[in-house]
Image (cartoon, rainbow, N blue to C red):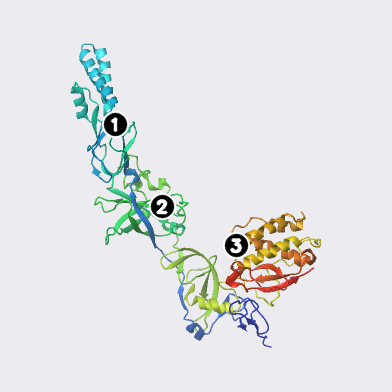
Amino acid sequence: AEAAPHYTCSMHPSVDLPEPGACPICGMDLIPRLAHTGGADPHRFELSAEAARLAAVRTAPAAHQAITRTLRLAGEVTYDQTRLADITAWFPGRIERMFVDFAGMRIRASDHLYRVYSPDLVNAHAELRQAQRAVKRLAGSPEALSVAEATLSAVRSKLRRWGLSTRQIKAMASSRDPIDTVTVYAPTGGVVVERAKVEGTYVQTGTRLYRVADLDWVWVEAWAYDHDLPWLAFGQRATFTVDAVPGRTFEGQVSFIDPYLDPQRRATRVRLSVRNTEGLLKPGLFAQVAIEGSTGGDGPRMVAALVGQHVCPMHPHVVKATPGRCDVCGMRLVQAEALGYRAPDPQAPLPLVIPATAPLITGRRAVVYVSTGTAEAPAYEARPVVLGPRADGVYVVTSGLSAGEQVVVEGAFKLDSELQIRGGPSMMNPLAEPTTQPTSQPTSQPTAPPGPPLAAGVLTATVDAALPLSAALAADDAAAGLTAWGPVAAALAALPPEPSLQALRAAATPAPTDLASLREALRRVSVPLIAHLKANPAAGGRPATVFFCPMAFDNAGATWLQPAGEALANPYFGAAMLRCGEAVVEVSP
């Protein structure tokens, strides 16, 4: 005999009732449940050829292939920190004149910077003159002459360390009048990015006067988020544009990837070193960076072109084919592998990929539909898969599929809806356990008594405290909920130290801080509390109704208590779905 039809809800496919009527969860009219035609496997079902055509189902094979992704990152042009220099005072004194008197001025090495008055200079001049006279006076005594010449050399070295040129030292040596002012010249060239002092300022040895940057090289620092990191590697080619130079695309290479995540930005800094001899790139400009990336496993990686190349540990943008020393700091170059970067494995298998339109993703899980039938008898199977990173138009699949299997790339959502109507496991309902009657015991709750019988009224304070918390959450009132949590925590702390109540007492922690954590806390308390009330109705001290919402917490379902006779008010969704749920059972002393 043909089995009697069952009825389900198009919005809640877990409902399975023997007669037509209204959905016990949302009140919609029930519809006939279609018979499952996929055999013993509930994940598999069949369609007619006409139904598959109307659903516009299209498939494509899962295949191993090389994949790339173009990362679009926001960045900024900054100073090359290895080319920043401070010009400081070499000896104490008063600045009489600043020749370089504003930031932005471009200077060259040996350009005059400032003139300074210093009493120490008078003393140094006297020492120089005295040492010269000693050398002349002791010319006939070799031993004494050697000491005098060493003293003269030391005085000249001190003046050179003070920034005086050879010409200035010779002028001082030939001058009979005391010298108390001197002009200081630039030891390095670049652009003055900061003038720290003004004329008339008294300075001490080491006081910073200028900061100079060599802008022939600049950095472009871009920020990569967590999902971008698998695609980054040392040495990758990068391009970028800046609004200040429209129509121009600049090129660079990834020269450094920070080994840590910035806690404020929640991103990792990626650096490009770029030559800027034209002066078009100005620090502070925003840049739109594009990096051609490919996956190659975990850990620091480098591109294949850098295998065997020699890199400076301090300045990674300095790369040479042969051993040598860094052009910037003189440090000995090492092979790129010695810096911890892993070379790509040419023997590694290509990743298994599927088109990006194939998976149905709910956040924590992904489902693809695999074609298992023929053109005359289409059949499809819902297959959970584990996805890797997303590339340009494809997803990497790490498990759940094999190469060559045909996955649905168009019409998957229609197939998933069909499987839900048939009551099978689907994207939103992985377990698909049917509700056979409106007052059935939810499968997520304990069905056996949780321990020895409890004394009458022992849970009264806990029930009385939980009911206002549930009402506050149904009203979406976080402030009232936090106020109501205090009595709940106090009631749980006051429970007798019986082993059977340990789980209920433990539900007091952690303390909630917002609406979401309040709802989680209510579920945490409700599970053991309701289990005890079902086993010991007299322990609650008052009549109450147990309600169940199958859609709470990503379809995991959750229960709660309300006073007997009150209309359903869902505390887990509040106004969003206030009437979603069903009465499970009444507990009464």
Left-right relation of 176 to 436? left
Q: Are marks 3 and 2 in contact (CB under 8 Å)?
A: no
The kind of residue on which mark 1 rests is Arg
Above-or-below relation of 474 to 180 = below
Specify the quadrant of the image occupied by residue 312: top left
Left-right relation of 355 to 540? left
Could you say where residue 382 lies in the image, as x and y percent from the top left?
Answer: 55, 73
Q: Can residue 211 be seen in this view?
A: yes
Of all residues, the one furthest to the bottom in this rendering is 1
The front one of 423 and 350 is: 423
Q: Is residue 444 visible?
A: no
The front one of 208 and 351 is: 208
Q: Residue at x 28, y 28 (%)?
A: 118
Q: Quadrant of the N terminus?
A: bottom right
Above-or-below relation of 165 to 128 = below
- The residue under label 3 is 478
- The residue under label 2 is 269
Q: Do the residues labelled 1 and 3 touch (CB within 8 Å)?
A: no
Could you say where residue 271 lies in the image, as x and y percent from the top left?
Answer: 37, 51
Sooner in the amino-acid sequence: mark 3 or mark 2: 2
Above-or-below relation of 447 to 344 = below
Could you say where residue 439 lies in the image, as x and y percent from the top left?
Answer: 71, 75
Disc 3 crowd rating (10 Å Cα; few below 14, some 14-19, many 20+) is: many
The kind of residue on which mark 3 rests is Ala
Local SS, label 3:
helix
- The residue under label 1 is 94
- Marks 1/3: CA–CA distance: 65 Å
- Marks 2/1: CA–CA distance: 43 Å
The kind of residue on which mark 2 rests is Arg
Above-or-below relation of 39 to 392 = below
Sooner in the amino-acid sequence: mark 1 or mark 3: 1
